[in-house]
Amino acid sequence: MVPRYARPAMTAIWEPEARYRIWFEIEAHATEKLGELGVVPPSAAKALWDWWATGPKIDVAAIDAIEAVTKHDVIAFLDWVAKEVGPEARFMHQGMTSSDVLDTTLGVQLTQAADILIADLDALLEAIKRRAIEHKYTPTIGRSHGIHAEPTTFGLKLAQAYAEFARCRARLVSARAEVATCAISGAVGTFANIDPAVEAHVAEKLGLAVEPVSTQVIPRDRHAMFFAVLGVIASSIERLATEVRHLQRTEVLEAEEYFSPGQKGSSAMPHKRNPVLTENLTGLARVVRSAVTPALENVALWHERDISHSSVERYIGPDATITLDFALARLTGVIDKLLVYPERMQKNLDRMGGLVHSQRVLLALTQAGLTRDDSYRLVQRNAMQVWQSDGQLSLLELLKADPEVSAVMSAQELEDKFNLDYHFKAVDTIFARVFGE
């Protein structure tokens, strides 16, 4: 985790103290149920909760010092609690194994992280929707292969992004549910030394579902799906960030990141206004996606369990969620303050002498009786002259002067095919699909 790209709420989930607090809750809830079942004295859970209620208790340094000797983190934690609580603490961890604590804790942490990320997505969706409605009918050029294609609106560009991030949100909600499971099943997951009722009790207290078959570890296909969804969200972030970066290029300059007073774009060139935020988002997306392959490789563990996944998750759990949280918040800020230049968009639309209307003329010529091949040839012949003139010539005027075209279409009919508003007749339909009626 790099502090530069981290926000406090998400970072707090992965702090050692937070992890140990979850460990304690798991152990205390389990001991509580074991007391109800008569496996351990009810006083054991009471002693744990009474000690916990007296104030902050986690001493990370003390636990780490014990682990330096035991070489086992869960045993170190249990030893430390035992020293703090006293004899009743010996009833903790009855019939449990380390994975019961570790895997259930990871489930809690990932669900907490998912809740923050879902809230992040909600904020981003709100910002995109507001700007999309603002620019619903702002004409701009649509590009394919980076080349002028046909007119669209800037609002439609943002509506596409909204729909994409709405899908991301739905996937994350599903992934959250899939990873929110609890395993308190003991060695190799058979419940030989612990009643399944204990697992159900802990799961209910922590807001998790019970893992149907844990084999001592929660199956990592759940986690692989979770991190895959984070990777997809990162790619969607990059897609929108890349769009902004392209629109900010000097030759385009249809939109750009907000440039605050006192901000400097270059140590060498005072005139620079660089898309540093969206470039940063492009890089952060790569970091989040880098967690996907290790998460997929974690699925294939040996037999009932091994710990080859453990070291991986200690990295990717914090890094992927913290980075994505920061990236979503940054992208929300970019969209919220994005500078949009409708005049430049119109200028670029007009840049190539009306070439963006070529398809309408092509279709009109076919409806006027020409073959599609002849229609394409006539339009392309004139369009290439405009292209070679770098937009100095007018496609409309060239078509009017072309005898083969004028033989089947009047000047007024041709002019009608260069109406910009024609391209926007379905904008309301698309917005209704995306945002509702």
Image (cartoon, grey):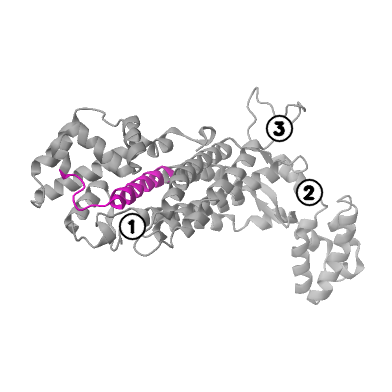
Front residue (pair 176, 364) = 176
Per the rendered image, the range of residues in magenta is 91-117
Separation (CA) of disc 1 from disc 2? 62 Å
Location of mark 1 (residue): 217
Residue type beneath disc 1: Val
Residue type beneath disc 3: Arg
Neighbourhood count class around disc 2 (C-alpha, 10 Å): few under 14, some 14–19, many 20 upward: some
- In the figure, is residue 207 to the left or right of 356? left
Whether pointer 1 and pointer 2 mark residues with C-beta atoms closer than 8 Å, the reply is no
- Counting residues from the N terminus, which is met first, the one under dot 1 or under dot 2? 1
Whether pointer 1 and pointer 3 mark residues with C-beta atoms closer than 8 Å, the reply is no
Asked if one can make out residue 386 in the rendered structure from this viewpoint, the answer is: yes
Asked if one can make out residue 52 in the rendered structure from this viewpoint, the answer is: no
Separation (CA) of disc 2 from disc 3? 25 Å
Task: Find residue 37 and report its horizontal and vertical position in percent.
Answer: 10, 52
Front residue (pair 19, 120) = 19
The mark found on residue 350 in the picture is: 2
- In the figure, is residue 151 to the left or right of 199? right
Location of mark 3 (residue): 273
Neighbourhood count class around disc 3 (C-alpha, 10 Å): few under 14, some 14–19, many 20 upward: some
Residue at point 43%, 33% (across, down): 8
Neighbourhood count class around disc 1 (C-alpha, 10 Å): few under 14, some 14–19, many 20 upward: many
Separation (CA) of disc 1 from disc 3? 51 Å
Report which quarter residue 305 is drawn in. bottom left
At numbered mark 2, what does the secondary structure look like: helix, strand or loop? loop
Front residue (pair 319, 346) = 319
